[in-house]
Amino acid sequence: MSHRAKRLKLAPLSSAATAEAQSEWRTKRNDLGEAFGTRKAKSQIKAQERGKVNAAAMEGVKDHLMESIVVDEETEGESVLWRREAS
């Protein structure tokens, strides 16, 4: 029984709590890297920050992208991305 109780203590409570803790850890690690890291480490941190996608900023683009995706019947239901010509 004690072995099982130990496993329960080590198990994460929920995936949301784990994601939040991981995000907080990453933020703290990046802060330390920017303060005390090498030039290469600092450039890697900046590159990771530039590569993040802001989901809130993408909300306006989502409808436009969904309109541009068309299911082509000739290709047996495969999605085909196409652009409309501005008329």
Image (cartoon, rainbow, N blue to C red):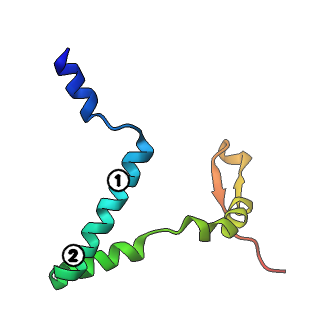
- Horizontal and vertical percent position of residue 4: 22, 20
Q: Residue furthest bottom?
A: 39
Residue placed under numbered mark 1 in the picture? 21
Vertical side of 10 occupied by 51: above or below: below
Foreground pick, 78 / 25: 25
Q: Residue furthest right?
A: 87
Quadrant where the N terminus lies?
Answer: top left
Q: Hey, which quadrant is residue 14 in on the image?
A: top left
SS at badge 2: helix
Q: Is residue 23 left or right of residue 33?
A: right
Tell me which numbered mark, 2 or 1, is placed earlier along the sequence.
1
Q: Is residue 14 left or right of residue 30?
A: right
- Horizontal and vertical percent position of residue 84: 75, 71
Q: Residue at x 41, y 46 (%)?
A: 17
Q: Residue furthest top?
A: 1
Residue placed under numbered mark 2 in the picture? 33
